[in-house]
Image: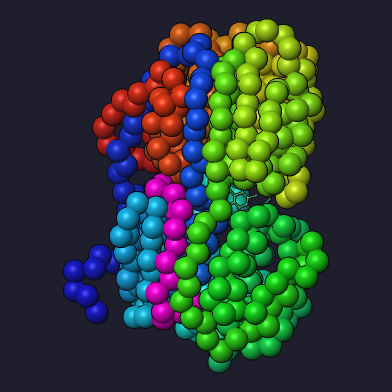
Amino acid sequence: MAGDRRFHWEYQEEPVERQAFRVTGGRPLRGRVRISGSKNAALKMLAAATLTSEPCRLTNVPEIEDVRAMAEVLRDLGAEVAHPAPNTYEVTAANVEWLFVPLEAAAKMRASFILLGPLLTRFGRVIISNPGGDRIGRRPVNLHVDAMRAMGANIEYRNGYYFARSEGRLRGTELAFPTVTVMGTENAVLAAVLAEGHTIIRPAAREPEVDDLIAMLQKMGAQVARTSPDVIEVEGRGRLHGAEHDVISDRIEAGTFVVAGAITGGDVTIEAAPCDFLGSFLDVVAEVGVAVACGRDTIEVRGTAPGAAQLRAHDVVTAPYPGLATDLQPPTAVLLTQATGTSAVHETIFEDRLEWLGELRKLGAEVEMVDEHCAAITGPSHLRGAEVEMGDLRAGASLILGALVAEGESVIHGAHHVRRGYEDIERKFLDLGAQIEHISEGLGTATR
Ligand code: EPU
């Protein structure tokens, strides 16, 4: 075992370098922006690489904090993780001897729980921290744990950790999730590919990132396929081999830039845009009255000058794919502040995901909470610069959007949230003509 490897026996919240963005709004954004690889696909693929002792090479991996955190977790397990070029990662999990995912990893990144399935199915045991909650709600993992138990695992919960074991290989089974869960589906798939026998998952999440994970697993030799829109079937194999895979583009980042172009009266061409995966969102954008044109992998957005009263209010409801993504609820809400009339925003996936609207209100948005799952947004609002705080990455990116259309200067604290999930967001906005800079605020905790 490498003597210089750091282990995290004891949890201590690491200080983070706190930064704020200073944004001066009111400039139309113009030009081209290239979308990076999908965070929520790349993280699962890095975890999938632990299913084999052979090297797996991933390209189009976004350069973001969550990916760096996942790479660190994999290194702590004993995997070799190379980063030979920007956006390329190579993982070789030949010498994994440390089957422990600490609270420190889980506190940084909830997605660390995706290691439950692959480590348990390949090595027969893992101790993994409960990722607990985050700023958008409780975020339980009971469905992941139930799925592993249904496949024969013995899982005990003690002191914040799941102690998971299986006698021999996990066993394929019929899994019936009581609700659609993206990571729950992915964990089940990752476990089933090395389990003994046949697994049927229903309802399986339909998100494009799940299908991209399946595509990578197929290249690794797994027998896994989506056999109907919400059913995934897996025939377990004894071993998998290495593979190369190019991660799909990030549809949430693409949606964020659609709104940026739309509300600033700009003219933005979004490249490497996964148009096919943005159907419900682009329908909303079109209903609101934004001019968007989709090419094969580009989206052109012709914006409306703020306050021009051409955008129309529209009620939206978040839903599992192919519905409107909950991760696009915050950018959509910012768009609706510029539309004439009152729009209802229903959040159906996460319990506290409308809380950030309190910060949007500080920029002058007219937001009324109808109940904890529904807000009414009345526009068009003349937003004005203010000091606001990001609570999570999607809300964070959306506060930048609000600040871009606001008159005057805004200071948005908590920039590290955005760096978790958006590659080079500041440079991308600068290249489009935005006035945005970061200010260092010294060391602090992730929350304040
Ligand atoms: N749920 C349970 N028990 C579970 C798992 C989920 O009750 O064991 C509930 C959740 O509380 C939620 C619903 O099921 O109410 C759906 O949650 P899901 O499991 O689908 O969410 P997730 O897999 O934890 C992923 C993305 C999120 C994205 C959601 C929904 C990753 C790493 N995260 O989370 O992305 O919002 O799916 O699409 O893939 C983000 O990128 O900012 C982000 C939050």
For the point 60% across and 86% down, the residue is 237
Image coords of residue 23 (percent x, y): 42, 19
Q: Is residue 102 left or right of residue 344?
A: left
Instruction: State the count of labels.
Output: 0
| Residue 422 can be seen, yes or no | yes
- Answer above or below: position of 32 versus 251: above
Quarter of the image where the C terminus is located: top left
Q: Which residues are magenta?
A: 51-64
Q: As displayed, is residue 281 above or below residue 174? A: above
| Occupied quadrant, residue 168 | bottom right
Determine which quarter of the picture holds residue 178.
bottom right
Residue sitting farthest toward the bottom: 168
Quick check: is 62 in the magenta stretch? yes
Instruction: Identify the residue at image location x=46%, y=24%.
Output: 432
Identify which residue, 103 or 33, lies in the foreground. 33
Q: Residue furthest left?
A: 4
Residue 220: x and y in percent read 53, 76
Position of residue 315 in the picture relative to residue 245 (left or right): right
Q: How is the image coloured?
A: rainbow
Residue 345 in sight in this render: no
Query: In the rendered view, would you say 48 is above or below 379?
Result: below
- Image-based side of 200 in relation to 219, left or right: right
* Residue under the point 52% across and 15% down: 28
Where residue 7 sits in the image (x, y, percent)?
Answer: 28, 66
Residue 417 belongs to magenta span: no
Quadrant (top left, top right, bottom left, bottom right) of the N terminus: bottom left
Q: Give how far across and how far down residue 120 sits, in percent.
A: 52, 78
- Residue at horizontal 63%, vertical 21%? 302
- Which of 147 and 321 lies nearest the eye of the viewer? 321
Q: Main secondary structure of the magenta part?
A: loop
